[in-house]
Structure formats: structure tokens, C-alpha cells
Amino acid sequence: MTTTGPQLPSDLLDPAARRREQRSWYVYDWANSAYVTTTLTVLFGPYLTAVAKKAACPSLPSDAGCDTNLSVAGIPVSPGSLALYAITATTLLSALLLPVVGALVDRTGNKRTVLGRFAWVGAAAASAMVLVTGANWQLGVVLQLVASLSLGCSLVVYDAILVDIATPDERDAVSSRGWAVGYLGGGLLLALDLVLVQGHGAFGIDEGTAVRLSLLSAGLWWGAFTLVPYLGLRDRPPRDVTPAAGRGLVRAAFGQLVATLRDLRRYPQTLRFLLAYLFFNDGIQTVISAASIFGAEELHLPQGQLITAILLVQFVAFGGALAFGRLAARVGAKRSILSSLVLWVVVVAAGFVLPARSFTLFLGLAVLIGVVLGGSQALARSLYSQLVPLGREAEYFSLYQSAERGTSWSGTLLFGLVFQLTHTYRAAIVALVVFFVVGGLLLTRVDVRRGAVEAGNAVPAVV
């Protein structure tokens, strides 16, 4: 079946040039995945929880329970829920900030420069986490907020660039390769950090110092490897953006945002996908954010075993992302995502019954997570790119990024609230099933072919 719709832009007609830019684009996933994996997924949640416990219960051992709440702006907050609430706050701010960032980016011709600036601000905040010590949980929350907001802003630009460097038929494969490279890079740094954390005594440091040095390494990795896409990508002039005469760039950005939200009803398939993604991605992101806390606090697994399990996820996810990319080439991205959501329900159910201190079973669960993690995220990005109106990629991807990696809010809010009410993470994790079920049901109603035509895009051969 031949593709239909508009002809490709001239800058996509040279396959060799496309491949060069695609290789540079992949490296940003390699760069930021160090922060996502080492900091957000594995180390910072449990570390911030331990710091919060020390602030609330300074006389108790670090591995003891703490029933005393912290006071955050006069609101009682359980130390065990602080990290989850910090993610929730980040996402609520993202919902306000990212769409405006996306509108601004669509009106500029220097996406790679904007990408680099956001990345380097985030990398600086991530590196500064080495300074979070003692009971200073406030500094940890602020740095997490800055780093994660910067990550979200950079990913708005990064995802929008996918449309500039890949044809519609290439996007499933290119997006999957980007995620795969990211898992490989994040896994490699995590492996090095595993040696440092588990063998901290051999290096003459305590475990807390080893964790903080690992946080530093993630920030430095993120900042250094961002140079590759910054130097390897090309800037392109804005496409099909309506000029705003007499208005400044920021006012024009807000005006474009209002127009996008108003006009979203003209793209019902895009809207349906966004609603579906809001649900199933919240479930995925909550599992990612809460996995290390669940393993440490509910299953009582030591830090070294948690890092080993997440490391396994990274390398399995590398193959899983590529495998789901090949599956999408045969049956389409939508069917592939629906298959992954069924497996996510199995993951949550298995986590609920997992016995404490069972490292072997936890590793088995990690393998299953790795298989579906990369595929569901990579294909969601490429499928959404087919439904984004031409010339408004960054603004629409800003809506997408509001619920992206580590920034989901309803899932983490529910998870934190259920724990605060029940004092068990098992009840919290089983509540996540609803996100995958509702998201899957909404996704079945998305007509990808019709949505691509409505958005003015070429239709891929396999949908």
C-alpha cells in the first residue's frame, strides 16, 4: 500500500543525510537516560526518602519505620510519600510550562540550541544533587524539580525533531532505536554506579557518599553527551506557523497555545490518543518512579539488589524496544502498544503478590518490565508523531511530554495517597491496574489512518 498525503520536505529526501542526523539524535536518549535511570528510577527516590526520614525522626536508625510527618508549607507529609509528591508537583508545573515552551520552540529555527540549553541546565541541577546530605530534603526537592522540568522541556524539543529527521514510514524504527540506545547508555552508567555503591567500602567511602557520587555522575554524563546532538543536528526554519503581527514571541506563544487547545477538537483522533496516553503512560511512569521505593520499603531489598534489578531492566529493554519496533512494522504501532498494555497489567498483578526479600522473583519481574517498557514508550512517541498537525510539532509534543518519563501526576498522587492511608505499598501498586485498562480501552477507539490525514500528514504503509 502506498502512502498518501503531502509530499516529503526537500530536507528529508537525502537518505544519507537523514541517517547522519538520526544517529546524532539517538545520542540524546543515551545522554538523558543516565539521569532518568540512575537518578529518577533507582537512587534518588530511596535516598530522598531516607533523608526525609532523618529529618522527621532523627533519633531512629535509617532502616527503621517513621510515623512522624514532615511539615511542607504547613501540610503534613509522610516521609515515605515525599519523593512521590515531589514528582507530582513537578508534573503540575510541567502542565503549565511545557505547552508554552513548545509554542515558543515552534516559532524558532534553532531547536538544537534550545535542546542543548535545557539539557545543560538540567544536567547542572542533577550534578548538584551530590550536595544533598544529612536531613536537607528541601534542597533535594528543589534540585529534582529543576532537573526534571529541564528534562521535560528538552524532551519536548527532542521529540519534535523526530518529525524533521525521519519519514512517516521510518518513525517507528527510528523512535525505537532511540529508546534502545537510551536504555543501553543508562544501563552502562548504572552498571558503573552499581560497582561503586555495592563496593563502596573498597573505595574508602560510605554508602551515602557512593550514592551521591553516582548522582553526580548521572548529571555529568547527561551534560557531556548532549554535545553530540548539539553538534550533529541541523536547525530548520519554522514550518506553517501563522505569524503573529504586532505581538512578541512570548505573547504569540500563549496565543498559539490557546488556539491549539481550542482547535484540538478538530483532530478527534489526536485528542483520543492523548487521553489514552494520559492514562496508560501515568501507569507506566508510576511503576518506573515507584519501583525502587517499592523494592526497598515493601520487599526490603538492599540497595545493591535494587540497582542490579534495574540494570537488568535496562539491557532487556534494549532488546525489547527493537523487538517491538519490528513488531510494529508488521502489525502497526497501535496493535503493538495494546499488546504491551496487557503485559503491564500482568506486571502490576505480579508485583502485588511478590513476597518480601525474594530477589530471584523480583529479577523475573524486572525481565518482564524490560520486555514491554521500551516498546510501549517508543511506539507511543512514533504513533503520536503521525497525529500531530504539521508545523506545530513542539507545541503538541509539549502536551505529550506533560505525562512523559517520571512526570506523571495522577498515578504518583494515587500511589502516594494510598500508601499514606494504608501504610502499605502493595495496596498502592494494585491500584495502578485501572490506568492500563482505561488507557487501553481509549486507545482501541483511535483511528490512526484517519488521524494522520486530518493532521495533514502522510499516512505510513502499516498502521
Image (cartoon, rainbow, N blue to C red):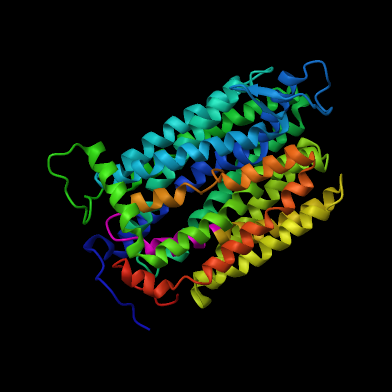
Q: Is residue 303 left or right of residue 277?
A: right
* Numbered range of the magenta stretch: 377-392
Identify the residue shown where x is 40% and y is 61%. 385
- In the rendered view, tell whether residue 310 sits above or below residue 365: above
Residue 254 seen in the figure: yes
Residue 346 included in the magenta stretch of the image:
no
Identify the residue shown where x is 50% and y is 27%. 125
**Nearer to us in this view, 118 or 91:** 91
Quarter of the rendering occupied by the N terminus:
bottom left
Identify the residue shown where x is 54% and y is 23%. 128
Quarter of the rendering occupied by the C terminus:
bottom left
Q: Report x, y in % for residue 218.
A: 56, 34
- In the rendered view, tell whether residue 110 sits above or below residue 163: above
Q: Is residue 91 left or right of residue 241?
A: right
Q: Report x, y in % for residue 332.
A: 49, 74
Q: Report x, y in % for residue 240.
A: 21, 56
Q: Residue furthest left?
A: 246
